[in-house]
Image (spheres, coloured by chain):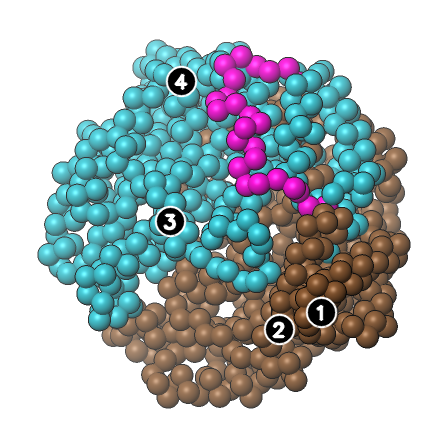
Chain colours: A brown, B cyan
Amino acid sequence: MDAAEFRRRGKEMVDLIADYLENIEQRPVYPDVEPGYLRSLIPEEAPEEPDTYEDVVKDIERVIMPGVTHWHSPYFYAYFPTANSFPAMLADMLSGAIGCIGFSWGTASEATLVALLAARSRAVRMILASDPQRPETGITSKLVAYSSDQAHCSVERAGMIAGVRMKKIPTEQSDKYAVQGETLRRMIQEDKAAGLIPFYFCATLGTTPSCAFDHITELGPICNAEKIWMHIDAAYAGSSFICPEFRPLLNGIEFADSFNFNPHKWLLVNFDCSTMWVRKRSDLIGAFKMDPLYLKHDHQESGRYFYTDNSLFRSLKMWFVFRMYGLKGLQDYIRKHVELAKEFESLVRADQRFEISADVVLGLVCFRLKGSNEVNETLLKRINNGRKIHLVPCQLSGQFVLRFAVCARTTESRHIREAWRLITQLAEEVMQELPH
Amino acid sequence: MDAAEFRRRGKEMVDLIADYLENIEQRPVYPDVEPGYLRSLIPEEAPEEPDTYEDVVKDIERVIMPGVTHWHSPYFYAYFPTANSFPAMLADMLSGAIGCIGFSWGTASEATLVALLAARSRAVRMILASDPQRPETGITSKLVAYSSDQAHCSVERAGMIAGVRMKKIPTEQSDKYAVQGETLRRMIQEDKAAGLIPFYFCATLGTTPSCAFDHITELGPICNAEKIWMHIDAAYAGSSFICPEFRPLLNGIEFADSFNFNPHKWLLVNFDCSTMWVRKRSDLIGAFKMDPLYLKHDHQESGRYFYTDNSLFRSLKMWFVFRMYGLKGLQDYIRKHVELAKEFESLVRADQRFEISADVVLGLVCFRLKGSNEVNETLLKRINNGRKIHLVPCQLSGQFVLRFAVCARTTESRHIREAWRLITQLAEEVMQELPH
C-alpha cells in the first residue's frame, strides 16, 4: 500500500470509525462468544501472498467485532470509563505517523523484567520446596542473574527493579562480542562456591551496540542443567527470523524459557508492538496472580487478563500488516534492509581511511575512521550537526564506533550513497583539522 | 467535534499524514532546538474556551515539527528501526476507535510501581547514610509498604515486583472505606517495634470498588514525619479535580511525594495516557539511572530519557483535547457524568427493594438488592447475559455489590433510565425465583 492508496483507504477508515461510533448503541455491549472463538475464524498462519484490503475490511465485522466489549457504548457501566474523543483520535493518527519511540521503558524492557520476575518466583518456589523453613528474603538476597556486557541497559535496570544482583558477563572482540559458554559456566561455579544462587540469564540475539548473537546452543544446555531461566532478548533481530536464511541465528531456542522480539522495530508494525513467548505459562501467571472481584467474570481462567485481554485490539495492526504484506512481502522488506547494509559496508571497506568494527549480519554496520576516539567523536558530532542524516555511537573494546542502522521503510540505495558521500566529506574535513 | 466534523477532519488528517510521509526526506532529520524550546511556543495553561481546529492544525508545523526527530526519514540511521506502515496506521485508527483497555498492567499501575521503586531507593540511601556498613539486602528485607485494603490490585503487585512487604490497611464502612490516620499510625508503630522499616504508603483518591477517598490531610503529616513516601493514586477521580467543586477532594496533596491520574479514564484522551507528578525529580532519576553510550547526546541531562523523550508525541492527543474542548468543555463533561450518576442514584433510592452501598461522590454508584449475596450475584449475571448493558461487581464489607459507573462520552439521561428499566425488570424476575 503506497501513500496514494493510504489516502483512499484512510478516508474510508474515517467513515468506518464514524459509522461505528454513531451506531454503537445498537450493538450488544458485551460479546456473546467463548474464549478462543477466534481460532476457527482465522487461518493458522500468516498468508504467503498479500490478502486484498477488501478482505481485511470484511473481516472486521466477521472476525473482530463479535469479540468486542464496546467500552464506548452508552450502555457500558463497568469498571471505570476509558476515554474516547474525536480530537484525541485525530491526534493519535498524527502521532502514529510521526511514530517516535519511547526509549528506556517499553516493550522489550518489560519482557526482560517480566521474565526476570517469573524466574525469581520460580527459583524461590523451588528452594522452598526442598527447604521450607528458609526465610524468603534470605533466598532473594542470594539470587544472582546474568547478562552480557553488551546487553541493553534495560536488563540491568530489570535487576535493579527486582532487587536482585545482575552480573555482566564479559565478551571479547575475538568472540564477536558474543557470550561464550565457558565464561558463563565459570561464573556460575564461582558464584555457587560463594553461596549465591544463579537463577536467570538474559541472552541477546542481536545486541544494540553491534548486533552480536550470544551462543545459545552452548549457553542453553548450561542454563537448563543449572535450572537457570534463559530469557532471549531478540528485540531487533527477531523479525529477521521470518527469512529461512536467517533462521539458523535462532538455533538453540529450544533451550529457552522465554523469548521476546519487537515487531515494532523491523516488521512494519507501528510502535508499540512487542511479543513475548513463555515456555510454561504457569510460571508467568504464578508470579503475578491477582484476583479482585471487579476483574472476575464467567470465562475467567486465572491470570488470563494479564496479557491476553487487550491483545485482540492492540494486535489489529499486526494482523493488517501480515495480511497486506504477506510473508513474502515481509521477507522482501527484511532482505532489502540487509542488502542496503551490505552496500554501505562495501562502501566503507573500499575506503582505506575507514574500518569495519563488527561483522555485518543484518541491517547494522559498525564502522569508524582508523585513528583516535577523538577524531571519531568529532566526525559523529559533525554528521549529526549537519542534520541531514542521523547516527548514534557505541563503544566496542574501548573504541568509539559509529553505528549505521538501516531504519526507514523508504530507504533506498540512493539514500545510502548520499549518506556515505556526506560522511566521507565530513571525514575529510575532520582529518584535515585533527591529528588521527 | 461531532461525528460529522470528524469525518471531514479525519480525511484532512489522512492527507496531512500522507503529505508528511511522502515528503519526509526534505526535512532535517534531527531537530535544531534546545530542550525546553516548547515552553515559549505554547501558553502556560489550557484554554478556558475551545480553540479552533484550524489553529491547532497550524501549530503542528509551528510548534511540534521543529522538535521532531524524523524516525521514518530515509536519512535516519540511529538506534534501530522503529516500524511504520500504512496498513498498521489504518489498523491503529480502528483500534483507537474501539478503544478497549488493557486491564492489569498499564499506566497507573506503572506509576505506583515507579513511585515504590523510587521510595525503596530513597529509603535504602537514607539508611546507608547513617549506617554505611549495613548490607543493602538486609535493609530491603526489613522494608514495609502500606496501602488500603480498597486499593487497586496493582498496588499489591507492585510490592511483589519490588520484592518488599506490602501490608493492607483495613477500612470500615462507617469510615466510608477510607484509610484513617489513626489506623496507619498504629500499624507503623507496631511494625517499627518489630524491627521493620516503613517506607511507602499508597493512598487512593477514588478507589475502584466504591470511589472512596483516603484521608490524606491526616495521613500526609504522618507519612512526612516518618519519612514515608506518600504516593497518591487518583487514576479515575483525578480528572474531576479540574472542577472547583471537586477540588477539595484533593486537599492534603501538599504532603504527597508523588501523584498519578489517568486522563485516559475520564478526560477524553484515548488510551493510554497517564500522568505522574513527582515532588523531587532526583528521587526518580536516581532510582533508574542508566547511561549507555548509544543513549547519550549533546543535550543530555541524566535521566531525562526516562519519561520525557516521547512525551511530545504521545501527548499530542492531550493537547488536541485540551484545545478543542477548552477547560469549560472538559468541566461540563465531568459534571454531566456526575449528574447522570446522581440521577441513577435517585432512581435506586426511590425503589424500596434496593439500597445504596457507598456515598456517590463522582460518577460511580454502588448499589444492591436488599437481601442475600446470591440474589445479587444472580441479578448481575442476568444483567450481563442480556448484553444490553454491562456492569461489574465489587465486594464491600462482605457484601456483593453492583457497580454502576457512568463511562461513555455519549451516555445521556435516556440511557440511564433505560438501564434502570432493564435492571428492575430483571430484579423482578430474580426475586420471584429466589428467596432473598
Number of labels in the image equals: 4
Q: Position of residue B29 (x, y in %)?
A: 72, 45
Residue denoted by label 4: B243
Which residue range is magenta in the image?
Answer: B29-53
Number of the front mark, 4 or 3: 3
Q: Is residue A320 above or below residue B262?
A: below
* Spot occupied by residue B389 in the image (x, y as percentages of width and height): 53, 25
Dividing the picture into quadrants, the one containing residue A141 is bottom left
Name the disc covering residue B308, or none: none
In the rendered structure, find residue B282 and report the number of the disc placed on it.
3
Quarter that holds the C terminus of chain A:
bottom right
The structure residue drawn at horizontal position 57% and vertical position 57%, both measured from the top left corner, is B295
On residue A399, the disc is: 2
Residue, x 34% and y 15% (percent of image)? Answer: B245
Q: Amino acid at mark 3?
A: Ser
Q: Are marks 1 and 3 on the same chain?
A: no
Instruction: Identify the residue shown where x is 19% and y is 37%.
Output: B221
Categorize mark 4 by other alpha carbons within 10 Å: few (<14), some (14-19), many (20+).
some
> Which residue is disc 1 drawn over?
A368
Mark 3 or mark 2, which is nearer to you?
Answer: 2
Q: Secondary structure at mark 3?
A: helix
Mark 1–mark 3 Cα distance, whole angstroms, equals 36 Å
Name the quadrant containing residue A250: bottom right
* Label 1 in the same subunit as label 2: yes
Marks 4 and 1 close (CB-CB < 8 Å):
no
Q: Are marks 4 and 3 on the same chain?
A: yes
